[in-house]
Image (cartoon, rainbow, N blue to C red):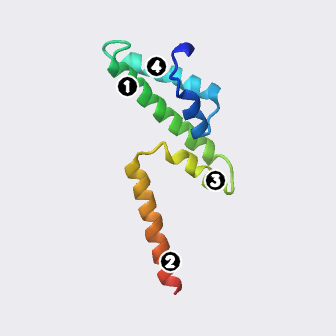
Amino acid sequence: MKGKSPKILPWIARKAGVPLARAEELWIDAVIYATQRADIVESPEYWKAAVDRLLALIAAESLQRSSAPFGLGPLVRLPGRLWLHSLDAQQALLTVAANSARYWQRRIS
């Protein structure tokens, strides 16, 4: 199972701040999930389900790891987690931040 992990797995793990060993465990969980849900094992739908599940598990793991420390830890790791979200979510976050900054700028002046 370990030999069939995606070649991009180390990159995904590094970007999410998840150790590679943990990412490999999550990949195994994702493959088991896809096996239970796919009609044909190793079909395109099977691999899509496995990769989608992996990304969801990595995102959850990344959020869990970043919420554990106190202080500025979550803010420091925020850019590393943004890639996990869709472009629409990133744009929405930037819009909210920009509108908030404009609001406070008007309130101060």
Q: Amino acid at mark 2?
A: Trp
Disc tally is: 4
Q: Residue furthest bottom?
A: 109
Estimate the x, y position of residue 31 in percent, counting from the top left: 46, 19
The vertical placement of 90 against 11, above or below, is below
Q: Earlier in the sequence, mark 2 or mark 1?
A: 1
The vertical placement of 18 against 75, above or below, is above
Q: Residue at point 58% right, 39% down? A: 15
Residue hosting label 1: 48
Image marks 4 and 3: residues in contact by CB distance under 8 Å: no
Q: Residue at point 45% right, 60% down? A: 94
Q: Amino acid at mark 1?
A: Lys
Q: Residue at point 48% right, 29% down? A: 54
Structural distance between the alpha carbons of marks 4 and 3? 31 Å
Q: Earlier in the sequence, mark 1 or mark 4?
A: 4
Structural distance between the alpha carbons of marks 2 and 1? 44 Å
Residue hosting label 2: 104
Structural distance between the alpha carbons of marks 1 and 3? 31 Å
Q: Amino acid at mark 4?
A: Val
Q: Secondary structure at mark 2?
A: helix
Structural distance between the alpha carbons of marks 2 and 4? 47 Å
Q: Earlier in the sequence, mark 2 or mark 3?
A: 3
Q: Secondary structure at mark 3?
A: helix
Q: Secondary structure at mark 4?
A: helix
Image marks 1 and 4: residues in contact by CB distance under 8 Å: no
Residue hosting label 3: 76
Q: Residue at point 47% right, 33% down? A: 55
Mark 1 neighbour class, 10 Å CA radius: few under 14, some 14 to 19, many 20 or more: some
Q: Which mark is residue 31?
A: 4
